[in-house]
Image (cartoon, grey):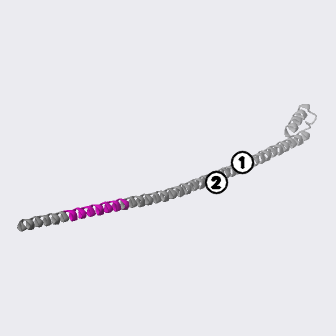
Amino acid sequence: AAAANATAQRELAEQRATTMREAAAANKAQADAAEAARSLELARLAHAEEVRASALANATVARDRAKADAEAAKRADAETRLAASRAEAARAEAARLESKRAVADAEARAAEAKALSASAESAAETRRADLLRSIVQEAASGAAGDMASNSSFVEALAGRLETIS
């Protein structure tokens, strides 16, 4: 009986030791699972923070790019307005030069017309003087030839004098 009792107690001690080992293993597994859950949550939080930081950086880059694009558009608009102003000034200058050339051409034509008029007037004066000279010569020769009494001669002389005036 004492041997059976010792065997039973030994078996009972072994069962307790096995149960304790199993309980310790279960506790360790539970602690490992809790640690793994904490690690997973920390990893998720770290990933979420990285995603947020990346999104913030991308938003900052996009904002800076939009600012740069807006400034470039403003510069391009200003350059376009400047080019348009310069083109308008060039057109105005060309019109002024064309107008100045037209005035100079008109002045040159007026001077040429005046010179032609003076030349024509001088030629007319020369013809008048020549005609008057010839009339005076005819009158002188007519008086010498006593033709002054001839009425046709006097009429011809009067017609020539009228042509002169």
Circle 2 Cα neighbour tier, 10 Å, few/some/many (<14 / 14–19 / ≥20): few
Identify which amino acid the numbered label 2 is placed on. Answer: Ala
Label 2: state its secondary structure. Answer: helix
Q: Please give left or right for residue 97 compared with residue 149 in the image.
A: left
Q: Residue at x 82, y 45 (%)?
A: 125
Q: Position of residue 109 (x, y in %)?
A: 71, 47
Q: Nearer the viewer, residue 1 or 25?
A: 1
Q: Is residue 125 magenta?
A: no
Q: Give yes or no for contact between labels 2 and 1 (Cβ–Cβ under 8 Å).
A: no
Q: Which residue is mark 1?
A: 106
* Up-down relation of residue 114 to residue 57 (above or below): above
- Residue 89, which numbered label? 2
Tell me which segment is drawn in magenta: 22-45
Question: How far apart, in angstroms, are the residues tagged by discs 2 and 1?
Answer: 25 Å
- Disc 1 element: helix
- Looking at the image, which is closer to me, 165 or 4? 4
In the rendered structure, the answer to whether residue 22 lies left or right of residue 116 reads left
Left or right of 147? Residue 76 is: left
Identify which residue is drawn at 37% across, 62% down. Answer: 46
The kind of residue tagged 1 is Ala
Q: Position of residue 148 (x, y in %)?
A: 92, 36
Q: Residue furthest right?
A: 149
Taking depth in this image into account, of 140 and 78 the one nearest to the observer is 78
In the picture, the quarter occupied by the N terminus is bottom left
Quarter of the image for residue 13 reads bottom left
Q: Is residue 31 magenta?
A: yes
